[in-house]
Image: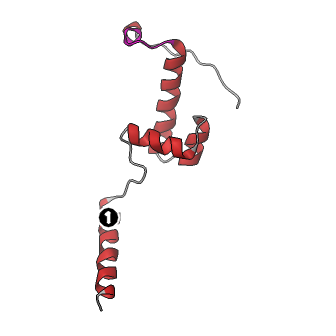
Amino acid sequence: MYEATFEVRVPTNLLEYGFDQSQLQQHVTEWIVLSLFTEERISSGKAAQLLSMTRLEFLSLLRRRNIAYIDYSAEEIAEELEAVKALQTNSSL
């Protein structure tokens, strides 16, 4: 994968938390990819690829970061509940 180099300025007191340059680079890359994913600009597969991990590893990362993989709207949840109720009604006939 090709890379671009940018200068990123961070407060020096962030270094007090034990970050070295490579860890900071990894966190910034992860943050950008997670942002793109949550904004629905890239798929989970593309996000995994950008982070050099499998899709399963990416889903695990989402869980560790408390980011929903599937983010239903209130309307979508209501539709799903109605579908479940309809299935229950039909199966009890």
10 shown above or below 50:
above
Instruction: Give the image quarter of residue 2.
Output: top right
- Residue at 45%, 14% in the rendered image: 19
Q: Position of residue 64 (x, y in %)?
A: 39, 38
Q: Which residue is mark 1?
A: 77
Query: Is residue 42 visible to the viewer in this orientation of the structure?
Result: no
- In what element is the residue under mark 1? helix
Q: Position of residue 82 (x, y in %)?
A: 30, 75
Q: Amino acid at mark 1?
A: Ile
Q: Is residue 17 magenta?
A: yes
- Residue at 41%, 12% in the rendered image: 18
Mark 1: few/some/many CA within 10 Å (<14, 14-19, 20+): few
* 30 horizontally vs 73: left or right: right
82 shown above or below 92:
above
- Residue at 52%, 41% in the rendered image: 57
Q: Report the quarter where the N terminus lies.
A: top right
Q: Which residues are magenta?
A: 14-20
- Residue at 65%, 23% in the rendered image: 4
* 29 horizontally vs 83: left or right: right
